[in-house]
């Protein structure tokens, strides 16, 4: 079979390992002109890497960031009949049908991990991957058995051309994001709906009750619609989490920091409760799991100042969640890659927490526009910096901090203007904090 692999990042490497068999002839196609490739591999590199794909039998959209429309524009609409993805292939060949897919704008990684850990605590063998940790095709190397469970975190990039739906599909809060990649908000929502659209009447569609878009996404399913944050899903009453009449724990016992994580906890409980009603497993995980790296992660205290790494925050709502979650007076590091998003809610949210903010440090491409939005709402307690070194940015933040304060990296924007990705940004922050 003549196969083209589009994109040679981590997913492309995964695709190459999977399809590299004697019967297949593989061509690696990538926009970069200089990349490290397997020895003697046929390749097509550079700006025209998507052109002339008609002679291939199978085309792998290995880099999720490649929009299917780009492939069509470089060829013709019929070319999509030959296109698949790592995620589609995983669904096609996975030895178990016990798959849980989690999507939404924020909280996917945390919720997916909570679900996996609750199932593990109840005695299930669980494989966690997707957009978090292990690429889908590499999960197949784990010896998945028919009775095992798979939990996949799935972003819109992976969902836009998904041809399968799992028996358990979860949609967390959805707000406009990635509109520089999608044609419009409707396409963004439609991508999320792909996780649900092929469900049967025996399947489960779980959604966030207080988010209209989340409900709209789930309604693409023919399965059983179950809201969370209200009955019959998990909900909060009198500062306690319940599902049905079963009390899980007091909200103050939740190990995750921030009220926004109450939503993620309720989503995980609602999902797993459809599979196992193991109160001990649920309570153990909810009261002990304190979170993933780069999600309002406490790093260390230096000279009486606490440092929090929230590099994963690439939208304004996530930054506001960090503002609400951290109780100390804060020096907030905000800014990043310019996507032209509406900043009015971010500005209003920052102004509403004025009494808790010592200073806002504005960095990156968005610094000046964010400053303008903050001024519009009457907030001027910020400083704009063009510093590029995270160590210098942290040192600047420290100059405004007092004993008992917190320096918080919670950018509210993507990282691509100054860093490779949010992990790179977060690691640079960690290195800077360790160097103090």
Image (cartoon, rainbow, N blue to C red):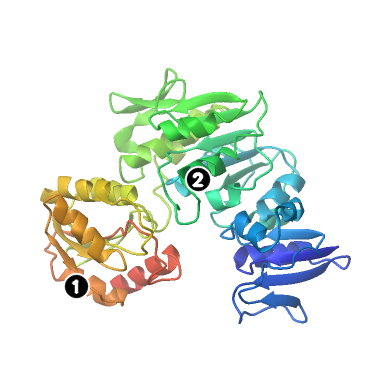
Q: Quadrant of the N terminus?
A: bottom right
Residue 133 placed where, x, y %? Answer: 55, 57
Viewer-closest of 384 and 391: 384
Q: Which residue is mark 2?
A: 188
**Label 2 crowd bin: few (<14), some (14–19), many (20+), radius 10 Å:** many
Q: Earlier in the sequence, mark 1 or mark 2?
A: 2
Residue 404 lies left or right of residue 192; in this view the side is left
Q: Examine the image and state in which quarter residue 264 appears.
A: top left
Residue 180 placed where, x, y %? Answer: 45, 56
Question: Alpha-carbon distance for marks 1 and 2?
Answer: 38 Å
Residue 320 placed where, x, y %? Answer: 27, 48
Picture layout, residue 345 above or below residue 167: below
Q: Nearer the viewer, mark 1 or mark 2?
A: 2
The answer to whether residue 50 is seen in the rendering is yes
Return the residue found at the far right: 23
Q: Examine the image and state in which quarter residue 430 appears.
A: bottom left
- Residue 346 is marked as none
Picture residue at 47% right of the left edge, 47% below the top: 184
Viewer-closest of 184 and 125: 184
Q: Which residue is mark 1?
A: 396
Q: Are marks 1 and 2 in contact (CB under 8 Å)?
A: no
The answer to whether residue 325 is seen in the rendering is no
Residue 51 placed where, x, y %? Answer: 69, 68
């Amino acid at each position: 079979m003549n196969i083209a692999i589009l994109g040679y990042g981590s997913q492309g490497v995964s695709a190459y390992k999977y399809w590299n068999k004697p019967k297949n002839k593989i061509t690696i196609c990538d926009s970069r002109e200089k990349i490290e490739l397997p020895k003697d591999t046929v390749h097509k590199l550079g700006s025209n890497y998507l052109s002339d794909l008609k002679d291939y039998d199978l085309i792998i959209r290995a880099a999720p960031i490649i929009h299917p429309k780009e492939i069509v524009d470089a060829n013709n609409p019929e070319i999509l009949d030959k296109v698949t993805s790592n995620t589609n292939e995983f669904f096609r060949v996975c030895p178990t049908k016990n798959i849980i897919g989690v999507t939404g704008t924020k909280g996917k990684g945390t919720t997916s991990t909570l679900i996996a850990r609750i199932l593990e605590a109840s005695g299930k063998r669980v494989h966690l991957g997707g957009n978090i940790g292990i690429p889908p095709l590499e999960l197949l190397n784990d010896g998945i058995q028919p009775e095992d469970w798979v939990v996949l975190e799935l972003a819109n990039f992976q969902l836009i051309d998904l041809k399968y739906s799992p028996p358990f599909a979860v949609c967390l809060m959805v707000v406009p994001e990635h509109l520089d990649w999608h044609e419009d908000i409707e396409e963004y929502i439609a991508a999320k709906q792909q996780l649900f659209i092929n469900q049967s009447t025996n399947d489960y569609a779980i959604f966030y009750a207080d988010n209209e878009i989340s409900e709209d996404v789930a309604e693409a399913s023919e399965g059983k619609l179950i809201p969370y944050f209200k009955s019959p899903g998990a909900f909060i009453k009198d500062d306690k989490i319940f599902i049905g009449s079963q009390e899980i724990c007091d909200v103050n016992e939740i190990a995750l920091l921030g009220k926004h994580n109450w939503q993620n906890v309720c989503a995980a409980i609602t999902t797993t409760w459809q599979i196992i009603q193991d109160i001990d497993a649920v309570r153990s995980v909810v009261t002990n799991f304190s979170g993933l790296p780069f999600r309002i992660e406490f790093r260390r205290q230096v000279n009486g100042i606490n440092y929090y790494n929230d590099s994963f925050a690439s939208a304004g709502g996530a930054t506001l969640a960090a503002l609400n979650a951290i109780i100390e007076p804060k020096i907030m590091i905000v800014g990043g890659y310019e996507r032209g998003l509406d900043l009015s809610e971010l500005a209003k949210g920052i102004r509403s927490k004025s009494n808790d903010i010592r200073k806002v440090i504005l960095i990156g491409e968005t610094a000046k526009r964010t400053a303008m939005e903050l001024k519009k709402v009457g907030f001027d307690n910020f400083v704009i910096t063009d510093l590029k070194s995270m160590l210098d940015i942290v040192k600047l933040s420290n100059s405004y901090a007092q004993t008992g304060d917190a320096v918080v990296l919670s950018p509210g924007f993507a990282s691509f203007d100054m860093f490779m990705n949010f992990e790179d940004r977060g690691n640079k922050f960690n290195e800077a904090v360790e160097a103090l």
